[in-house]
């Protein structure tokens, strides 16, 4: 009788084992070659690009509705409304809003300027700001590459004279012109509401406000006729053409509050304190304080107008120069050193060469 031939269980098991080893080796080889990884990455990138396109389309739709302006809050609310993101919303250490899409992507969103938002699938590290680079009052006096052209003359020598969480103040290194505010009553009216708001930004500190009654209208307000002139005549030192909304405004000289704040922060003596009475501002409760010239706040060769009402006559401004800060107004001409107020968030880098700080326009 003829025997039937077949595959034994042992042979079958060995065959299956060999095939499994070969398959495993092939998969490892493919992974080592990066083919599988690249394939997965390609799919992920494609999905991410599709998600990004969808997010941008939604953002552009809001921009159209809002006439070219959008906030992070408006954008996130729209994404929630369209059920594109999860409910959990967080903020990272750089201030970006972090959301997770329904498809599993982490999205970082932050305000990009005042009218747009930036979207990224990677953490957004914003550029350093001028204020973040100023570590202490030791940086006061350092130069900044702020440039402005006024009446055909370019001014690019500016020094940091003070900063806080909101603003950085730059003062011209040298006298740029002469003025004759000391002769006769200034013809300009008192500050407008907009000028008053600007003056407030240059006051800084917690000193009492100047409230001597206006001789023209009788209103209890800042009677800053001389200050109004220093704001109007020197407003063009605020270079909004290049620096846009980063520039708050300019004035023809530092306010007393600004000078006192910077002076004290640098640790100079005597310490200055502002007081006020019916005659106007005083320093250390006097109309005159003797100081040592430092070149930044108190020049060594000229007197410079300070953009604050005088303690002698509220039509005029205080003077600082050489070895004193006082109410003396009997000088024919005095140099003017404009001060520019920048937002503290203006992008900047530590400069090289001639400048200590370089602004990003």
Image (cartoon, grey):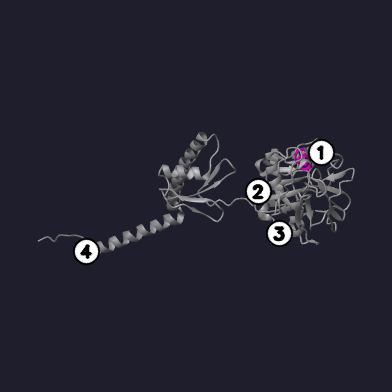
Magenta residues (range): 226-232
Q: Which residue is mark 4?
A: 9
Query: Of the numbered discs in the image, which one, if any, rests on residue 347?
Result: 2
Q: Earlier in the sequence, mark 1 or mark 4?
A: 4
User: Which residue corresponds to the image point at 71% horizontal and 52% vertical from the top-left?
Assistant: 208
Discs 2/4, front:
2
Say what secondary structure mark 3 lies in. loop
Mark 2 touches mark 1? (CB < 8 Å): no
Viewer-closest of 106 and 91: 91
Query: Of the numbered discs in the image, which one, if any, rests on residue 186?
Result: 1
Q: Look at the image and tell me in which quarter the C terminus lies.
A: top right
Number of dots carrying numbers: 4
Question: Principal SS element in the magenta part?
Answer: helix
- Residue at mark 3 to residue at mark 4: CA–CA distance: 83 Å
- Residue at mark 3 to residue at mark 2: CA–CA distance: 18 Å
Q: Is residue 248 visible?
A: no
- Residue at mark 2 to residue at mark 4: CA–CA distance: 76 Å
* Crowdedness near tag 1: few (<14), some (14–19) or many (≥20) residues, C-alpha within 10 Å: some
- Residue at mark 2 to residue at mark 1: CA–CA distance: 39 Å
Q: Earlier in the sequence, mark 3 or mark 4?
A: 4
Q: Which residue is mark 3?
A: 136
Discs 2/1, front:
1
Say what secondary structure mark 4 lies in. helix
């Amino acid at each position: 009788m003829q025997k039937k031939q077949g595959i034994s269980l042992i042979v079958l098991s060995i065959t299956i084992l060999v095939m499994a080893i070969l398959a495993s080796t092939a998969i490892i080889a493919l992974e080592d070659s990066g083919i599988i990884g690249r394939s997965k990455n390609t799919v992920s990138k494609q999905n991410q690009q599709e998600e990004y396109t969808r997010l941008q389309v939604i953002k552009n739709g809001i921009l159209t509705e809002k006439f070219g302006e959008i906030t992070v809050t408006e954008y996130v609310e729209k994404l929630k409304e369209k059920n594109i993101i999860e409910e959990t919303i967080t903020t990272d250490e750089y201030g970006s809003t972090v959301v997770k899409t329904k498809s599993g992507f982490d999205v970082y969103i932050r305000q990009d300027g005042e009218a747009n938002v930036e979207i990224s699938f990677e953490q957004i590290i914003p550029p350093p700001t001028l204020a973040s680079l100023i570590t202490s009052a030791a940086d006061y006096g350092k130069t900044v590459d702020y440039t402005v052209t006024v009446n055909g003359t370019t001014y690019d020598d500016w020094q940091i004279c003070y900063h806080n969480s909101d603003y950085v103040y730059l003062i011209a290194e040298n006298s740029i012109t002469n003025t004759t505010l000391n002769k006769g009553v200034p013809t300009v009216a008192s500050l407008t509401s907009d000028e008053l708001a600007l003056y407030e930004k240059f006051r800084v500190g917690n000193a009492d406000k100047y409230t001597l009654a206006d001789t023209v209208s009788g209103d209890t307000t800042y009677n800053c006729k001389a200050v109004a002139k220093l704001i109007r005549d020197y407003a063009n030192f605020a270079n909004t053409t290049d620096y846009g909304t980063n520039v708050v405004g300019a004035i023809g000289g530092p306010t007393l509050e600004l000078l006192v704040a910077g002076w004290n922060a640098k640790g100079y003596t005597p310490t200055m304190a502002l007081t006020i009475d019916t005659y106007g501002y005083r320093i250390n409760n006097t109309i005159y304080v003797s100081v040592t010239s430092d070149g930044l706040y108190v020049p060594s060769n000229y007197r410079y107008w300070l953009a604050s009402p005088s303690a002698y006559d509220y039509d005029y401004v205080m003077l600082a120069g050489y070895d004193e800060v006082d109410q003396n107004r009997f000088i024919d001409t005095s140099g003017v050193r404009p001060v520019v107020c920048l937002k503290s968030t203006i992008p900047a880098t530590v400069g090289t060469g001639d400048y200590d700080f370089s602004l990003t326009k």
